[in-house]
Amino acid sequence: MKIVFASNYLNHHERFLCDALYENPRIDFVFIQTKPIEQGRINMGWQDMSDVPYCICSYESPDDYVRAMDSCNNADALILGAAPNEFIAERVKKDKLTFFYAERLFRNGVWHMLNPLTFITVLKRFIIPGHKSNFYLLAASGFTAIDTQKITAFKGRRFKWGHFIEVAYPEGRKTKVDDGKIHLLWAGRFLKLKHPDYPIRIAKTLKERDVDFVLDIIGSGEQETAMKSLIKDYNIEDNVIIHGIMKPTEVRTFMEHADIYLFTSDFNEGWGAVLGESMASGCAVVTSHGIGATPFLAKHNENGLIYETGNYGSFERNVLKLIESKELRKRLSKNAIDTMLNLWNPKNGAQRFYELCKAIIETGKPIYYPDGPISKAEIINNNWFKDDTK
């Protein structure tokens, strides 16, 4: 079976799934890269991965463009990520098996559809194809299903999906720093949507309660000056360390050392790969319910703790639960590793996707798994989670 994945560029969010598809002996896999990776991403520690054997860079020459278009037009199944519509134009006409790989469509509200240019884009990319029988949705957010419902697209053809991260080490691997302190970690760009003030505010509370802890913060961004001012005002310079930008592999090392991972973004966080990475690294996670990955990966009080987005009191209560209970941290850590090792790993995602394509091609009907990748992406609202500990 020939499967093609067309997107802007190969990166560490997609590489491990692509490797798993390429290594499957029943799949002839090709990745179409439609533009070079931006220098800004390289500066953030991302790698240019376009030299892998299964990648065609459609922009490098006219011959490469023809090869890319030919692969897209003749594939048994195509996944469309952040690639121009020209790569599926022929498939739309012929209603050939195609999957749209998408995070939230309307992070700031469906009213943006009133803009004529936005409406035309959504019409061509989602509404028209979304009514064809052989076009399906791979929802890379818990909220993509409701966004597509609002435009009446992909009804009955929506699957849970996501950005698959590396899950390469055995169960139980956790490099604990044996210094008697509780280690907390936050990583990301210092943007308002990610609420980087939350970890600093909780650090103040922990110091006031005489908790022996270290908070590592990784990243940079427009909120850095304000964050450093807070740290100074709260007199927590001895407990909080801002490390700056690191490569994804270096961040994973910090995750393996951390006891607790804090993920504080709001509804503007499309997927949030660090949730899966921190869970695979054995962190006890406190995650916002508005993050795209949270409804798919996290189960409250089973493999992590979920708090109400924008509700600092809910966030604080859940962090303090973990601070006060080593047993809870250990239980959530183990279950988080189990979730990533046994369910949300790239090999499982690739195999399930193959089985889905095979079922549709042979029977004309999709299959749904009970949980995890290629299970049904149910319609959930923004208020799907409520903190019952108020």
Image (cartoon, grey):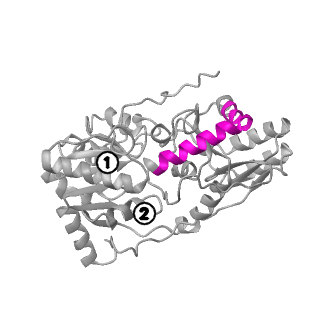
- Within 10 Å of disc 1 (Cα), the crowding (few <14, some 14-19, many 20+) is few
Quarter of the image where one finds residue 287? top right
Q: Nearer the viewer, residue 317 or 341?
A: 341
Is 340 within the magenta? yes
**Range of the magenta residues?**
316-341
Quarter of the image where one finds residue 21? bottom left
| Rendered location of residue 99, percent (x, y) | 27, 50
Q: Going 72% across and 53% down the picture, which residue do you hit? A: 216
Which residue does the numbered mark 2 point to in the structure image? 15
Q: Going 23% across and 73% down the picture, which residue do you hit? A: 67
* Main secondary structure of the magenta stretch: helix
Secondary element under disc 1, as helix, strand or loop, is helix
The quadrant of the image that shows the C terminus is top right
Which residue does the numbered mark 1 point to in the structure image? 121
Earlier in the chain: of badge 1 and badge 2, it is 2
- Asked if residue 220 can be seen in this view, the reply is no
The quadrant of the image that shows the N terminus is bottom left
Is 137 within the magenta? no
Residue 171 badge: none
| Rendered location of residue 42, percent (x, y) | 54, 68
Three-letter code for the amino acid on which mark 2 is drawn: Arg
Q: Going 47% across and 51% down the picture, which residue do you hit? A: 341
**Of discs 1 and 2, which sits in the foreground?**
2
Q: Is mark 1 in CB contact (under 8 Å) with mark 2?
A: no
- Within 10 Å of disc 2 (Cα), the crowding (few <14, some 14-19, many 20+) is many
Quarter of the image where one finds residue 335? top right
